[in-house]
Amino acid sequence: MECISVFDMLKIGIGPSSSHTLGPWRAAERWIGELKEEGSFDKLVKIRAHVYGSLSLTGKGHATDTAILLGLSGCDPEYFPVENIETLIADIKENKRVQLNGELELPFCEKEDIVFHRDFLPFHANGLTFEGFFPNGESTSETYYSIGGGFVVKEEREHAKENLQIFKTFPHPVQNGNELLAACKETGLNISDLVLTNERSLRSDEEIDKELQRIWNTMLESMYTGCHTEGILPGGLNVKRRAYEMHQRLKGDVIYSNPHDWIAAIRKTEVKFRQILKWVSCFALSVNEVNASLGRVVTAPTNGSAGVIPSVLMYYLVIENHEADFEHIKKFLLVASEIGSIFKKGATISAAMGGCQAEIGVSSAMAAGALTELMGGTPEQVLMASEIAMEHHLGLTCDPIGGLVQIPCIERNSMGAIKAINAAELAMESDPSHAKVPLDKVVNTMWETAKDMNSKYKETSEGGLAVGVYLSDC
């Protein structure tokens, strides 16, 4: 089993989709790197990209073509200014030229050189092939698969052996829930400390804290941006941003000037049950409205489900514990990543493979488990909360209208967040020894459900709401 770090499960990137945007972006970067390694980069005279399966069927709505152009241009999704995307893409389209990795200018007609194929490659639903052509008439090509959460692999998975070796260097290698509980029992550690021990085999405490702080800052910034931006989301559905007006009504007259002061300001607002529901929903909606407009978010574990974890963590900070600090945030993110990795190892976090249960379901399970530990739950209760959250997302389909990560995706984040909080509360009031369904059983059931699910409900926009609601209706 490959090594999965917290920083594999929680990645910073640009929306709207980790598998359809961030994955192809990273694949383009990887192809360029491989061309350079073999010494053929400077010899190219022409390039072309082929997109297959789910990447093709919903690629336009998920900005797959934009992501490929940005990746080929050498832009970094973690740092490239989102406000510059439109200008760069317009320049490529107008001049029919691309600066490959920002170094090599090549002819490129976006309508002809990004080819969308409706057929599926056999290895995975999200396949893409890059072709490079040389002056002597010869060519080279590589095929990659975007398997969810920004992870990119080749069919031969050439790095699997290396990852397995790293995994074995973990002080406490874990593949499933049972092994996680056994490791916690053996060491006496809670889940967050166990995960931290494993992370320390890869990087220093300073590096871990720095990156976790950067991840949280990105989450907070996406919530803040979403709550302070009004208007219509791009894409043609004419979806009105709702977080802005909801936030205006909830915050009242509190005063603040930055995202961190914002947290303190929210703590002063009224927190009756209805307000709590609205705040959590507002946080979740805000992130995914940013995601839908090609903003920067944290894949948690995917872009389409990016709002669940930050909204539940924000709930803890502004409702449950006003004294919470970075150590609480750190624990939350460590636990959430471990739960997510168990689902990735035992099932999938790709909606193209498993439907929306693989995105919102997994993110809800991650958030539920993480919240449970912060509220004082045992490792057994953490896994129970994660199981409860996923159990009530089983079979959830992925059917984005128009291929856009907007309807029903944005609202699903608020529902996943509320379910996560409820699942944590149920677990905290329960004796896990009486649980009838362990986490590993629900992971396996999710995977079996994914395999049985009709392909039209797996991020193809060929079933469900995607065909039941027409663009003209919007």
Image (cartoon, rainbow, N blue to C red):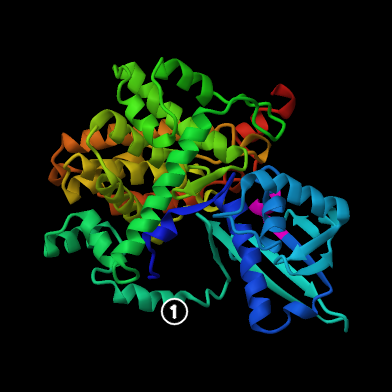
Q: Do we see residue 174 in this rendering? A: no
Asked if residue 408 is positioned above or below residue 455 in the image, the reply reads above
**Is 166 situated left or right of 371 in this image?**
right
Quadrant for the N terminus, please: bottom left
Q: Residue at x 67, y 84 (%)?
A: 38
Q: Residue at x 35, y 46 (%)?
A: 366
Which of the 4 image quadrants contains residue 114? bottom right
**Is 291 situated left or right of 258 in this image?**
right
The residue wearing badge 1 is: 161
Q: Residue at x 41, y 42 (%)?
A: 361
Asked if residue 176 is positioned above or below residue 242 in the image, the reply reads below
Which of the 4 image quadrants contains residue 422? top left
Asked if residue 43 is positioned above or below residue 293 in the image, the reply reads below
Crowdedness near tag 1: few (<14), some (14–19) or many (≥20) residues, C-alpha within 10 Å: few
Query: Disc 1 on helix, strand or loop?
Result: helix
Q: Position of residue 321 (x, y in %)?
A: 23, 33
For badge 1, the amino acid type reads Lys
Q: Position of residue 323 (x, y in %)?
A: 22, 36
Quadrant for the C terminus, please: top right
Q: Position of residue 301 (x, y in %)?
A: 45, 50
Which of the 4 image quadrants contains residue 175? bottom left
Most foreground residue, 187 or 120: 187
Does the stretch in magenta take in 108? no
Most foreground residue, 350 or 305: 305
Q: Do we see residue 191 in this rendering? A: yes
Magenta-highlighted residues:
51-57
